[in-house]
C-alpha cells in the first residue's frame, strides 16, 4: 500500500499538537499496527494504550479521521488512500498523554448504578428458573467491551461536559441490562431521571453508530429506559395502572 | 461552562476532523420535512378538493365536520371561532402532527438537521448550554405515547376509508370496485400501520415494559411484531410521510380533473 502520513496528537494533559509521521503500510494492517510501527521507527515515547488487538478489550479507543473508533479494528484499507490519517485521543475524558486518556470516571459512575438484586430463589436449593426468551433481550447488552467510544461520541459529555449529571450511553446499557433482567427486582428508574440524566439524551444515535459490538444502544436500551421513566413520572394513566399491578 | 473533569475544550460550530460529508444527511431531512409542512399546511387550508367519489384525503380523515358526504356530524360546527378559516383538516392534523413531532426517530433527526444539536456525530455545536429534554418545551416529548394512542385510533378510521374506497356509485347503484385511488389509499394505510406498529412507545406498551414476557404469550407476539417493525422505523417514517402527501395530492388532482382515476375492475 506504500508509505502513509499519520498526523498523531502528541502532548500531555490536554496541551499539545499534531505531529506528522510517515511509515510504510502493508497488506492487512490496522491503525494500531501503524502506531506500533511509528513507535518502533521514529517515536519511541509515543503513548498508546492497547491490549488484545482483537476488538475485545476496548483499550485502544481513539479518534481516527475524526470518528471514535478502535485502533485495532480500523483497517488501513478502509481509510481514504493517499491521504494523511489523523489519530487523536478521545475528547470526553481527561487527557493523560499522547493517545491515552484517563477513563476512570466511567468506573466511578458504574459504582453508582444499583447492582443486580434477584428475587427470592424459585427452588428450595436456592436456584432460579428463567425462560431463554426473557433473557434474550438483555444478552445483547452483555456484549459491551467498555471501550467507552459511545461515551466519547455522546455530545452531552463530549461537548457539554455534563459528567456530574449524566452517566452516558454505556451506563444506560448497563442499567438496561439490569433493569430488564427477568430476575432483577431493583428499581433504578428514579435515579435514571433524577441523578443519571437520561432526559439529556436527545436520541441522536451517535452511540449506536460508533459501537464496535453493534449494540443497538439507542433503540434497545436508552429509549426503553426513557419509556420506563415516562411510566413513572409523566404518564398519569400508567401510574394508576402500576398502583394496582401485582408486585413480582 | 462548568467542567467537572479536565477534558478538552468544546469544538467550534462545525469543527471536526471527520473527512466524510457529515452535513449531507441533514439536507434531505430539512428539505423533505420543510416541504411536507408547507404542503400539508396549504392542503389543510384549502377546504376543497379533498374527496373524489369514495376517496377521502388522509389529511381530512376522519372528516368530523365538513361539507362533503364523508362528514360525520354535518357542516361546520357553530363553536368554530369566526377568526379562523374552517377546514376539517385543521381538526384532524394536530394529532398526526403531534405523533410525528414527538416520534423518537424524528426527534433525533430534526435535532441534528434543524438545530445542529449536534449537527452530526463528533462535529462541534453552535451552543455552549444544553438542557436536553429535561425542561419545557422539550419535556413535552415525553407525551409521545398519547400521540400514539390518538394516531392508533385514527388508523382504524383510515382502514375504514380504504374499505369505503372500494364502493363506487355505478349505474345500478353502489358497486364493488378497485380504482387506482383505492390502491394508493391502501398503500398509504399499510405504510402508516407499519410506522405506528414500530413506534418505540407502542413497543414498550405492548410488551417492552415487562421483564418476563414469556408469561404473557399474546403480548409477546405483539412485542415481536412491534420490534420487527421498529427495526425499520426510519424507513416506515419516511415512506409513510411521502405516502400521506402523495395520497392527498392524487385525490386532489383527481378532484380538480387533472388526473382521471382509472378503475382496475
Image: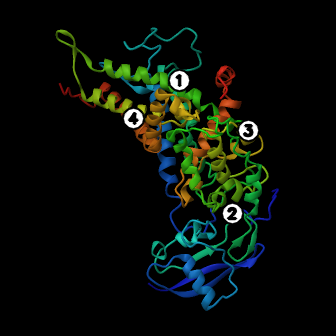
Which chain is home to disc 1? B
Left or right, A155 with respect to A164, comes to left
Mark toward the start of the polypeptide (2 vs 4): 2
Q: Which residue is mark 3?
A: B135
Q: Is residue B257 visible?
A: no
Between the C-alphas of marks 3 and 1, the distance is 24 Å
Which chain is home to disc 3? B
Which of A236 and B239 lies nearest the eye of the viewer? A236
Which of A190 and B110 lies nearest the eye of the viewer? A190
Give the vertical position of A167 relative to B33 (above or below).
below
SS for tag 1? helix
Residue B45 spot, x, y in % from top left? 48, 26
Q: Residue furthest front?
A: A125
Instruction: Evaluate whether label 3 is on the same chain as label 1.
Output: yes
Q: Is residue A58 visible?
A: yes
Q: Which mark is residue B150?
A: 1
What residue is shown at x 54% (from left), y 70% (from top)? A54
Mark toward the start of the polypeptide (2 vs 1): 2
Give the vertical position of B154 relative to A1 (above or below).
above
SS for tag 4? helix
Between the C-alphas of marks 2 and 4, the distance is 40 Å
Amino acid at each position: 500500500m506504500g508509505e502513509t502520513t499519520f498526523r498523531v496528537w502528541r502532548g500531555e494533559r490536554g496541551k499539545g499538537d499534531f505531529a506528522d509521521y510517515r511509515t510504510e503500510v502493508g497488506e492487512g494492517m490496522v491503525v494500531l499496527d501503524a502506531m506500533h510501527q511509528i513507535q518502533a521507527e521514529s517515536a519511541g515515547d509515543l503513548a498508546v494504550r492497547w491490549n488484545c488487538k482483537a476488538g475485545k478489550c476496548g483499550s485502544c479507543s481513539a479518534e481516527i479521521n475524526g470518528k471514535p473508533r478502535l485502533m485495532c479494528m480500523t483497517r488501513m484499507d478502509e481509510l481514504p488512500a493517499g491521504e494523511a490519517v489523523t489519530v487523536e485521543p478521545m475528547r470526553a475524558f481527561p487527557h493523560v498523554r499522547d493517545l491515552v486518556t484517563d477513563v476512570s470516571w466511567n468506573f466511578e459512575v458504574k459504582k453508582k448504578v444499583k447492582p443486580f438484586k434477584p428475587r427470592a430463589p424459585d427452588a428450595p436449593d436456592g436456584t432460579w428458573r428463567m425462560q431463554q426468551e426473557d433473557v434474550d433481550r438483555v444478552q445483547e447488552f452483555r456484549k459491551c467491551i467498555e471501550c467507552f467510544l459511545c461515551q466519547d461520541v455522546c455530545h452531552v459529555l463530549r461537548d457539554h461536559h455534563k459528567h456530574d449529571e449524566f452517566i452516558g450511553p454505556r451506563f444506560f446499557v448497563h442499567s438496561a441490562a439490569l433493569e430488564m433482567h427477568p430476575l432483577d427486582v431493583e428499581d433504578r428508574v428514579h435515579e435514571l431521571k433524577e441523578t443519571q440524566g437520561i432526559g439529556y439524551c436527545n436520541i441522536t444515535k451517535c452511540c449506536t453508530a460508533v459501537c464496535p459490538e453493534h449494540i443497538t444502544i439507542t433503540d434497545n436500551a436508552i429509549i426503553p429506559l426513557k419509556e420506563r421513566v415516562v411510566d413513572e413520572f409523566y404518564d398519569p394513566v400508567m401510574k394508576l395502572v402500576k398502583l394496582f399491578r401485582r408486585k413480582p | 461552562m462548568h467542567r467537572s473533569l479536565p477534558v478538552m475544550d468544546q469544538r467550534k460550530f462545525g469543527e471536526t476532523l471527520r473527512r466524510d460529508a457529515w452535513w449531507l444527511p441533514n439536507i434531505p431531512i430539512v428539505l423533505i420535512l420543510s416541504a411536507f409542512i408547507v404542503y400539508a399546511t396549504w392542503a389543510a387550508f384549502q377546504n376543497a378538493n379533498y374527496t373524489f367519489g369514495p376517496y377521502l384525503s388522509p389529511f381530512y380523515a376522519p372528516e368530523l365536520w365538513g361539507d362533503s358526504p364523508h362528514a360525520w356530524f354535518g357542516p361546520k360546527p357553530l363553536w368554530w371561532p369566526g377568526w379562523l378559516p374552517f377546514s376539517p383538516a385543521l381538526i384532524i392534523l394536530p394529532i398526526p402532527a403531534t405523533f410525528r413531532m414527538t416520534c423518537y426517530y424524528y426527534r433525533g433527526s430534526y435535532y441534528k438537521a434543524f438545530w445542529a444539536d449536534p449537527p452530526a456525530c463528533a462535529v462541534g455545536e453552535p451552543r455552549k448550554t444544553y438542557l436536553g429534554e429535561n425542561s419545557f418545551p422539550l419535556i413535552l416529548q415525553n407525551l409521545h405515547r398519547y400521540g400514539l394512542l390518538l394516531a392508533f385510533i385514527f388508523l382504524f378510521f383510515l382502514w375504514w376509508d380504504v374499505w369505503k374506497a372500494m364502493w363506487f356509485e355505478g349505474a345500478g347503484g353502489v358497486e364493488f370496485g378497485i380504482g387506482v385511488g383505492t390502491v394508493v389509499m391502501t398503500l398509504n394505510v399499510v405504510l402508516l400501520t407499519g410506522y405506528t406498529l414500530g413506534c418505540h412507545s407502542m413497543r414498550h406498551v405492548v410488551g417492552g415494559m415487562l421483564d418476563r414476557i414469556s408469561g404473557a404469550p399474546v403480548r409477546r407476539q405483539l412485542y415481536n411484531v412491534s420490534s420487527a417493525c421498529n427495526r425499520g422505523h426510519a424507513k416506515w417514517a419516511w415512506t409513510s410521510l411521502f405516502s400521506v402527501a402523495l395520497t392527498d395530492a392524487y385525490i386532489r388532482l383527481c378532484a380538480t380533473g387533472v388526473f382521471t382515476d382509472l378503475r382496475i375492475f
